[in-house]
Image (cartoon, rainbow, N blue to C red):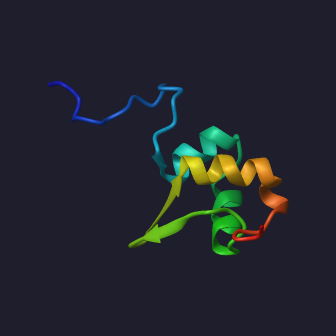
Amino acid sequence: MPPAPGARSPSDPTPPEVMTIDDLARYLQLSKSSLYKLAQDGRVPGQKVGRHWRFHKAAIDAWLTKGGPGARRGEP
C-alpha cells in the first residue's frame, strides 16, 4: 500500500511547513516535555489545534533568529 499523500517517513530530514511537537522536537533537538512547557508559557511560537500543538516552520526559524527560548513571542 503506498503512503498517504503528504505522509513523511520518520527518517525524512526535511521538516514540514507545519510541524507537530514530535517534528519540532527533532528539528530543535529538544525534548517534547521542554517544548510543551515552552509552548504553554508562550515562549515558542505555536498554537493549539484542538488538544494538539502545531508550529509553523517559518515562525520557528524567525524565533530562533531572535534568540530562541530566551525570546518572547510577539516581541519586536
Residue in the picture at 47% in, 26% down: 12
Location of residue 54 in the rendering, given as x and y in whole percent from the top left corner: 48, 59
Outermost residue toward the front?
76
Judge whether 7 appears above or below 49 on screen: above
Outermost residue toward the left?
1
Judge whether 5 appears above or below 43 on screen: above
Location of residue 40 in the rendering, given as x and y in whole percent from the top left corner: 64, 73
Rendered image quadrant of residue 2: top left
Residue in the picture at 51% in, 68% down: 47
* Quarter of the image where the N terminus is located: top left
Task: State how many labels appear.
Answer: 0
Specify whether 55 is left or right of 61. Answer: left
Residue in the picture at 69% in, 67% down: 37
Location of residue 49 in the rendering, given as x and y in whole percent from the top left corner: 41, 69
Location of residue 58 in the rendering, given as x and y in whole percent from the top left corner: 57, 48
Name the residue nearer the viewer: 62 or 41: 62
Judge whether 41 appears above or below 35 on screen: below
Residue in the picture at 83% in, 53% down: 67
* Quarter of the image where the C terminus is located: bottom right
